[in-house]
Image: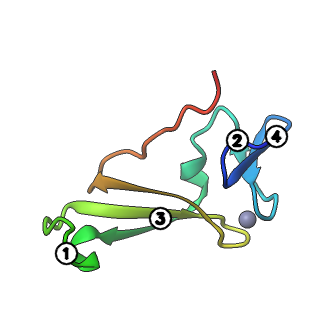
Amino acid sequence: MRLSQTLDLDGTSIVCGHCGHGLCDKDVNWKEKAILNETPMRTLGDPYSTDEQVLLRVFSCPNCGALLDTETAMKDDPFLHDKIFT
Ligand SMILES: [Zn+2]
């Protein structure tokens, strides 16, 4: 079952929509199991924030490297937890 453009549900597991790699159980924040790269937004040039604390987070599949999601956040903020189940 397709959860988003990048994630699928296989039984009770959230899996990469590209390669099918299991990330975690559906009750876990899958972002904690993905590869995380954080880049200060200021390094991306104008018109982005010049505050060193504002980050672009890029989440990728640990098996195939496919881009799974991105978010902007303040340094040390917890990951945004998308509620994809009701
Ligand atoms: Zn993958």
Q: Secondary structure at mark 1?
A: loop
Disc 3 element: strand
The amino acid type found where label 1 is placed reads: Asp
Q: Report the number of numbered marks.
A: 4
Q: Is residue 64 left or right of residue 20?
A: left
Label number found at residue 78: none
- Residue under numbered circle 4: 1
Which of label 2 and label 3 is nearer to you? 2
Quadrant holding ligand 1?
bottom right
- The answer to whether mark 3 and mark 4 are in CB contact below 8 A is no
The residue at 65%/27% (across/down) is: 85
Q: Amino acid at mark 2?
A: Leu
Which corner quadrant holds the N terminus?
top right
Instruction: Residue 8 in the image: state x and y as whole percent.
Output: 76, 47
Image position of 83 (left or right of 3) = left
Dot 3 or dot 4: first in sequence order is 4
Mark closer to the chain start, 4 or 1: 4
- Kindly identify the residue that appears in the image at 66 percent across and 69 percent down: 66
Residue in the picture at 76% in, 63% down: 18
